Amino acid sequence: MPEVRIVARNFMDMVASLPAMKLDQLYQNAFICQAIVRSLPPLAKKYVIQMLYVEEVVPGKLIEEWVLPDGSTKYRVAIDRLVQLRIFSETFDRTSGTSYRLNPTFRVNLQKHITIGGVLPREPMSATITVRLPSLEDLEVYAHEQWECFLLQLINSAQSERMTNISPAMMRIFQRGLLTQREKDAPRLTESGFQFLLMDTNAQLWYIIREYILNSEELDIDSADLIAFLLELSFHATGEAYNMNTLDEIQRITIKDLADLGLVKLQQGRKDSWFIPTKLATNLSVSLTDSSARKEGFIVVETNFRMYAYSTSKLHCEILRLFSRIEYQLPNLIVGAITKESLYSAFENGITAEQIVSFLQQNAHPRVAERIPSVPENVTDQIRLWEADLNRVEMTPAHFYDEFPSRDVFEAACDFARECGGLLWEDSKKMRLAVKTEVHMQMREHLRGQR
């Protein structure tokens, strides 16, 4: 079964797809330049820093000499990414070959940021104006609850205790590709939807942000301005209050949508209102990179297929329910079992054995995470075997032919079916064959012509 990769088109690909004029507009912001540099592969970062004060073109052969001979693959990846993002402009000359120059707008603004630092377009509000700001711990709890509530609503779960303020139309946009709509039954998760749930929070967040930006483009909102605001937001201080009056109309709408996702918390004073960024917002630019810190796991799987999940999250329970039988749930413990029936149900929904095994390994409890293997081998092997059982027999609609009047007619029919790519089986001794249903009408016409 093919594995679906919904993260193949990452956020940087979206930035790279912007027109050159919009990218230059984006690179006029020093904070955006810094965020883009954070997203680059390590070797690409090295090239940017080395060429930051070089205004002339640099031959590609010279840049290639900056890495060891066995680093040619990483060199190609780094150069391709820099060219895609138009940080490097590429020129070709018959004598010197390919040369590269750093984007002048990007270079000037990154130089300024490194030498004199950057100043955000808004400063935190005075403590005398804001009252009773939440502590960092309370803010983290708020962000976690908002995000979990959104995800539960996103996967159409009845476990969500409260609904977000996100409009049904916007929620359907977020659900595109994650749920499959059926006429009679309730919507069900697709393969992409399950993979989405298995991502870490930062990857999930950027998937949702990409959908949000794509929808905004349909509403004629400038995607470059929206991307700039989102990346700027990541450089605000967590827990500080920022006046809503410093935002324009589009940014105010955006900040209210982000509040439903848990990226900011909104508060109202006697005269002013303000927003408070959470860690989800300040991690936006960090999560542009593909690598992320390992999160602490919560699952223990035993050799008897029993599973113990030390979690209070209803979302975790919903994810585990997709491929296991939940037996009971305590305040901080979910107890279940991985059964043949529960896995067959998961496989029918497009979930693969490798996805399930990977999820169990990545979320192994710290007590078992250091073991090799972290999930018992008999469990992982059996999960793969149960999936293989479903794939042993492949059903193909077919038509069966026999009682041919002569061997010449039979062999001509076999040759015709083979040329059409529809021959499934033949018995030359008894002159019988089977062909795919889609070539049945063509086979009938062929046989009629043989009479």
Image (cartoon, rainbow, N blue to C red):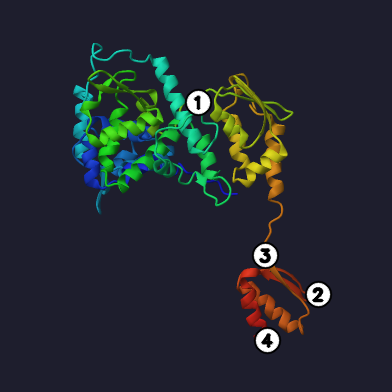
Q: Position of residue 197 (x, y in %)?
A: 52, 36
Q: Residues within 10 Å of mark 4 (few under 14, many from 20)?
A: few
Q: Reading the chain from its start, which is encountered first: label 3 or label 2? A: 3
Taking depth in this image into account, of 182 and 354 the one nearest to the observer is 182
Q: Residues within 10 Å of mark 1 (few under 14, many from 20)?
A: few
| Disc 3 to disc 2, C-alpha distance | 24 Å
Q: Which mark is nearer the camera, 4 or 3?
A: 3
Classify mark 1: helix, strand or loop: loop
267 vs 262, left or right, is left
Q: Reading the chain from its start, which is encountered first: label 4 or label 2? A: 2
- Quadrant (top left, top right, bottom left, bottom right) of the C terminus: bottom right
Q: Which mark is nearer the camera, 4 or 2?
A: 4
Which residue is tagged 3? 397
| Disc 1 to disc 2, C-alpha distance | 62 Å
40 vs 423, left or right, is left
Q: Which mark is nearer the camera, 1 or 2?
A: 1
Q: Are marks 4 and 2 in contact (CB under 8 Å)?
A: no
Q: Quadrant of residue 44?
A: top left
Q: Is residue 79 above or below residue 283?
A: below
Q: Are marks 1 and 4 in contact (CB under 8 Å)?
A: no
Classify mark 3: helix, strand or loop: loop
Which residue is tagged 4? 450
Taking depth in this image into account, of 428 and 64 the one nearest to the observer is 428
Q: Are marks 1 and 2 in contact (CB under 8 Å)?
A: no
Classify mark 2: helix, strand or loop: loop
Q: How many marks?
A: 4
Which amino acid, mark 3? Pro
Which amino acid, mark 4? Gln
Which residue is tagged 2? 429
Which residue is tagged 1? 294
Whether residue 75 can be seen here: no
